[in-house]
Structures are given as structure tokens and as C-alpha cells.
Amino acid sequence: MRFLLFSLILLLTATSLSAQEAHRRWRKMNQIRQDKFDLVLPEVMRENKIDMWIVTNREGSFDPLYKDLGEGYVGSTGYYVFTDRGEGRIERAALGISGYLLEEGNTYDYFGSDLELKEYVAERDPQRIGLNYSKAIGGADGLSYSGFLELSETLGEKYAARFVSAEKLVSDFRSRRVASEIAVYGEACELSYQIMEKALSNEIITPGVTTLEDVAWWMKEQLFKHKLESSFGMPSVYVTGPRGILATSSDRIITRGDVLTIDWGVGLMNMYTDMKRMAYVLREGETAVPPGIQNAFEQGVRVRDIIKQTIKPGKTAKETETAVYAALTAAGFNKMKGFNQFTDGDKTDVIIGCHSVGNWGHGVGPSIAFFNPVRLGFEIKPSNLLSIELFAYTSLPEWGGKKLRVALEDDAIVTSRGVEWLYPVNRRVAVIK
């Protein structure tokens, strides 16, 4: 009886703590939403010359910005509607979207029925109506074709003729950060790198016994333990050899002499990280990372330092990419023609992929990355979050001159001073004994 009572107390305590944590996270997300509606939304709607922004949600088919805008219950079709009426703030309405968590967040001025949309729009008579459709940015492409037809029919030809893509508005709104948002992102980063660094240790790995997927599943378990998410599915735990990546998150056993890398990130309160860590498994008799591997890592760190010193706000991502490669070339590095297209030369070959990060592992903001061509044209602004990602290929004497691929990635914020780290970044090759 005493044991049962003690167990019940523990259960109630755990439940109470869980409820407290859920409430804490909800309050923080409300603060972020309020700050972004107050500080960022007026700026980006006016820059993009959009008078009204309508975000459509359907039951079972939510817009990618559903969490950003407060979630809520949608019975059939619902709309978040933001109107610039020429005042200091943007008017916010939720039509056909309701519920405790949304309504108690105190971020919307009006709650009404989805049937009010036509009258609501006509009363405000916007000249340019932004809708979430985009060829290039998935996060700005939440409006389905049938949803577009429904909006066109509901509002009529007069207002349908005023529809424009909100692609750039969505990018600006999401990628320009407020202080409350950055605080949450820093918390997510702390959890992310701590889990990764523990994963690459003897606490988790026993050479000759542990497999790559054992490490990946342990990391997945940490998501449940800390009530986190991830935008990357299975963590990428991989071995790199003279022929490139040999195996990723498979049943391949980790052996002595392996060079390991983890590429992963966690999600906390709608903020997602993306980072990498690297480790070496000592061979019998070794006490430190071999000189060639250590040198290759240090070349990667040199590249990272140059990238960090070169990125400044006020230029497009493309202009910045050009400046970064010019600085790297001047420092003696070789720019690769394409991903994994390294040379046999003595120089360290480099390619960068400094992409937007934040509400997913790959964000929707300005991106200094070849795989985000549209976002290369966007201007880098203070408060943008960037994943400082690079791949450096350096020849190893231990591999007969063949090159080791060193992948470094850590998340940072752009300020008026340039790039600033949000947490302790990777400065060493972890050693597994």
C-alpha cells in the first residue's frame, strides 16, 4: 500500500512537471508570436507592398506556418487574415479558426466565422492580397489548388485579380528574428549539441560492438526524453573513408580507425537546429587523433573562420557567396566546381552551403548555398539565422594522399557586427577510445 501511494505521488509529480513544461513552452511561443506580429509583420508587409495577407488552413491540411500563427481548431476551412490599415500595427483576425490555445494567446484582434471572409475583405478593400503559393519555397506554398479556387470563388473576380504570391513576405516574416525567438533557438541549440557530443563518446559507443544505427536510435530516444522534434528523420551517423561516405545509420559496426560524423538537429517550440559533429575512433596503441586527420579538421576550421569573418548584413546572399569564395581563394583554398567534385591536388578543396535555418533545419530566409538559387538573391538582414556549413577535402598521408571530407556545421545569428555564434561551436575532433 505504501509503495502504491509512493508511486502515485511520483506519477502525479511527473504529470505536474510535464504540465508546467507544456505551459512554459506555450507562453514562450505566444510571446514570440506577439513580438513578431508587433515588430516584424508591419515591416515585411510594407516592404513587399501587400495590404492583406490571407493564410488558408483546412482540417487535415494545415499551412506550413500553422504553428507560427498560433495553430487552433479548423472545422472545415479557416483563415488567418492580416490587414495593413495604415496604422502602427497590423490588424489580425482568425476566421473559422478557434480554440483555447489560440484564443488565450492574446495575439488576435478578432475571431469570427469563415463565412465572414467576403464581407471582411470587402470592408477593407485591399489592393494587393498576398497568398501562400510559391514555385521555389515550400514553406511559402501552403495554399492548395482547390483552396485557391475556393478563395477566388468566395471573394469574386474583383479581389481574385488582386492576388499575389506572398513568397518573399513569408521568407522575410520567418527569417527576421525577435529576441524572444532567439532565446528559444539558443535553448534548442544547447540541447542539440549536447546530445550529439554525448552520442560520439564511449558512454554510447563501444568499438567493435556498437553499430551506426545504435547511435542513431539512442539519439532518437533523446527526442522522446526531452519532448523534442526533428526535421531530419533518422539522425545521419556516418563513416567517411578514402572513397567518401562508407555507411550511414546502418547496421555497420563502428571499428577502430573510423572517422565518424553526425549531421542532425532538434526541434523545440517551433525552432529547429542543424549542426554536425566529428569523431575519431582510436586504433590500438593510438593516444590521439592522427596528424593528417587533425590537419584536415584544422583546415576546415580555417575555412569556417574565413566564412564567419566575411558575412555581413546588407548584401545579397549571392554577393556574399562571391565574397566568401574570393576570400577563401586568397587564403590558398580551392573552390570546387560542384558538390563532391574535389581534385587530386595538394590544396584543400572547399564548397559552402550556408543556408537559412530556424523554423526547419533548412529555413526559408536568405541562403548562401548553391541548392537555394532563389534565396541567393535575398538580402541578408540582421537577426537572420544561418547554418554556417562547409565541406573541406584535404589529402591525408595516412590514406596515401587521398582526401578526407571534413564537414563542419554550426548555427549562428547575423548581427550588425557580422556573424555571432549562439553556443559553443565544434572546435575539436572528439576521441573515442
Image (cartoon, rainbow, N blue to C red):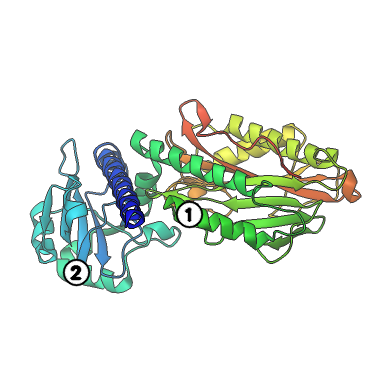
The CA span between labels 1 and 2 is: 31 Å
On residue 169, the disc is: none
Q: Farthest residue in the right direction?
A: 400
Other-residue count near label 1 (Cα within 10 Å), few / some / many at <14 / 14–19 / ≥20:
some
Other-residue count near label 2 (Cα within 10 Å), few / some / many at <14 / 14–19 / ≥20:
some
Label 1 residue SS: helix
Label 2 residue SS: strand
| Quarter containing the N terminus | bottom left
Question: Is 270 situated above or below 190?
Answer: below
Q: Residue at x 43, y 36 (%)?
A: 381
Q: Along the horizontal axis of the image, is 310 left or right of 88?
A: right
| Residue for badge 1 | 223
Q: Position of residue 261 (x, y in %)?
A: 68, 50
- Label 1 amino acid? Leu
Q: Residue at x 78, y 41 (%)?
A: 296
Q: Residue at x 80, y 46 (%)?
A: 282
Tell me which label, 1 or 2, sits earlier in the chain.
2
